[in-house]
């Protein structure tokens, strides 16, 4: 029996050999197709890119034939190795000249596959035929070949968006689950935070299990400093009545702190703090936001994360005005987070007159005076510089007078005394000058 295999008939030959039990050599009456297939695969390194893709496309159903999985793996390995080769940049380069490809493969021994693959995304659409099981296998093989994680993550999102378009809900759920598990294998910094938020929205819309929602959030959490406030303003789940999903944000912040193997960088922490202050201002006017939820939002970040408490104060002010029925205990529990020393002078004055804040949350009189003095000095740096220059001159005159007193009682003694008297007069004049200028300082309100 004469058999002429080709990349496009590989799947048919394997299926025929399996169902017709033509897989072993039992004599001339029972032809064995398997040796013909294996012999044909010996020339796989000369196949074009298109032939490799077609063969893999036809053979992906071999997952159900355990005896032919080795053939599927062999085709897949060569396809991925072709992608990792430095001589391949587009389908035309692969298929135009087989001998030229063989030469490029022979000279690629010392090159890093990571450098070769980064930015090469032309093949994304060529692999959209992959079924979900084969997608998992292909992706893991790519990682074993040290493919760039950024390229792999972009391919996974491209595949997910393309195959889920118009698919049934069960198919979308299965694809999303596999993509999530594959993303967990990648370096987090290689994944787009925007794509993760879009993936999370789809997972929530598909009502996926809590375990997979938690996996997505564990990917987003450590990248929270890369996102913007717009991505956090997700609608609250049905039945909650709130404007935004506060629980989602609380979980992300928790994973931001505990999703790192080392201590969080201070700059990243400050970026998250600024974004959370914006989120607080957005959710504070929500009449359905419970006091314990608002308190959790304002206390989840350490005090060191915020350089200013102005936004925090504004959020508290809005929340207390909307929730006028809160008890004094609830108000104090919310307001105790406010650091008066991190408030601007204007808002500190506003706080002292704010009737919605409990008296226990307002600064004491001496604290207010101290803060005003501090603000006054900061706003009048020219006065500070003036005082420093006057004091330096005064101290210099004092040193001159002491030097005069230590001189010997020779012929220059009288002249030294005369100079000392002049310096003393100058010191007195300087002191008078200090007193006269002090009269122009603005008075502090008691």
Image: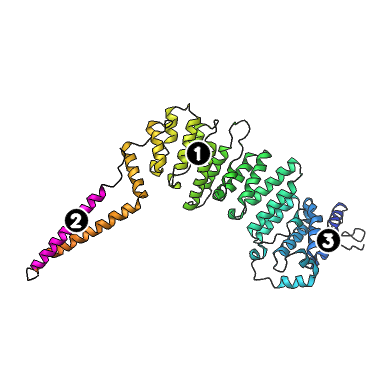
Foreground: 186 or 190? Answer: 190
Foreground: 276 or 347? Answer: 347
Q: Quadrant for residue 392, please give it.
A: bottom left
Tell me which numbered mark, 1 or 2, is placed earlier along the sequence.
1
Which residue is denoted by mark 3 in the rendering? 7
Q: Quadrant for residue 127, please give it.
A: bottom right
Q: Position of residue 119 (x, y in %)?
A: 67, 61
Tag 1–tag 2 contact (CB < 8 Å): no
- Measured in 3D between alpha carbons, the distance from the residue under mark 2 to the one under mark 3, in whole angstroms, is 104 Å
Foreground: 118 or 83? Answer: 118
Foreground: 63 or 251? Answer: 251
Which residue is denoted by mark 1 in the rendering? 297
* Marking on residue 429: 2
Q: Secondary structure at mark 1?
A: helix
Q: Quadrant of the N terminus?
A: bottom right
Q: Residues within 10 Å of mark 3 (few under 14, many from 20)?
A: many
Q: Quadrant for residue 342, please give it.
A: top left
Tell me which numbered mark, 1 or 3, is placed earlier along the sequence.
3
Tell me which numbered mark, 2 or 3, is placed earlier along the sequence.
3
Q: Secondary structure at mark 3?
A: helix
Q: In the displayed structure, does residue 197 sit left or right of residue 388?
A: right
Magenta residue span = 413-440
| Residue at 42%, 29% in the rendered image | 329
Q: Is residue 194 visible?
A: yes
| Residue at 39%, 41% in the rendered image | 340
């Amino acid at each position: 029996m004469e058999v002429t295999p080709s990349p496009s008939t590989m799947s048919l030959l394997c299926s025929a050999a399996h169902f017709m039990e033509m897989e072993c050599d039992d004599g001339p009456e029972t032809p064995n197709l398997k040796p013909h297939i294996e012999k044909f695969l010996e020339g796989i390194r000369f196949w074009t890119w298109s032939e490799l893709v077609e063969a893999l496309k036809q053979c992906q159903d071999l997952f159900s034939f355990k005896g032919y999985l080795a053939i599927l793996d062999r085709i897949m390995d060569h396809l991925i190795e072709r992608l990792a080769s430095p001589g391949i940049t587009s389908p035309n380069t692969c298929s135009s000249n087989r001998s030229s490809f063989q030469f490029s493969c022979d000279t690629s021994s010392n090159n890093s596959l990571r450098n070769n693959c980064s930015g090469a995304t032309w093949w994304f659409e060529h692999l959209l035929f992959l079924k979900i099981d084969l997608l998992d296998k292909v992706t893991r093989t790519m990682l074993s070949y040290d493919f760039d994680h950024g390229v792999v993550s972009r391919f996974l999102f491209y595949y997910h968006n393309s195959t889920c378009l118009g698919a049934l809900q069960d198919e979308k759920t299965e694809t999303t689950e596999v993509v999530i598990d594959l993303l967990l294998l990648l370096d987090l910094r290689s994944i787009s935070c925007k794509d993760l938020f879009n993936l999370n929205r789809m997972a929530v819309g598909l009502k996926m299990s809590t375990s997979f929602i938690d996996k997505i959030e564990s990917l987003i959490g450590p990248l929270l400093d890369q996102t913007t406030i717009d991505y956090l303003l997700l609608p609250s789940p049905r039945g909650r009545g709130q404007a935004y999903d506060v629980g989602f944000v609380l979980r992300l912040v928790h994973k931001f702190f505990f999703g790192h193997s080392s201590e969080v960088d201070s700059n990243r922490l400050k970026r998250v703090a600024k974004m959370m202050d914006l989120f607080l201002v957005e959710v504070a006017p929500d009449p359905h936001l419970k006091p314990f939820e608002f308190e959790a939002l304002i206390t989840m970040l350490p005090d060191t994360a915020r350089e200013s408490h102005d936004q925090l104060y504004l959020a508290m002010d809005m929340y207390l005005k909307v929730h006028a029925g809160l008890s004094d205990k609830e108000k104090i529990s919310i307001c105790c987070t406010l650091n008066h020393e991190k408030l601007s002078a204007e808002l500190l004055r506003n706080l002292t007159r704010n009737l919605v804040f409990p008296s226990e949350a307002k600064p004491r009189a001496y604290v207010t005076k101290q803060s005003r003095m501090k603000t006054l000095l900061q706003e009048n740096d020219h006065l500070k510089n003036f005082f420093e220059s006057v004091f330096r001159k005064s101290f210099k005159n004092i040193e001159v007078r002491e030097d005069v007193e230590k001189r010997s009682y020779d012929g220059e003694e009288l002249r030294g005394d005369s100079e000392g008297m002049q310096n003393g007069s100058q010191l007195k004049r300087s002191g008078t000058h200090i007193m006269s200028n002090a009269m122009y300082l603005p008075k502090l309100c008691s």
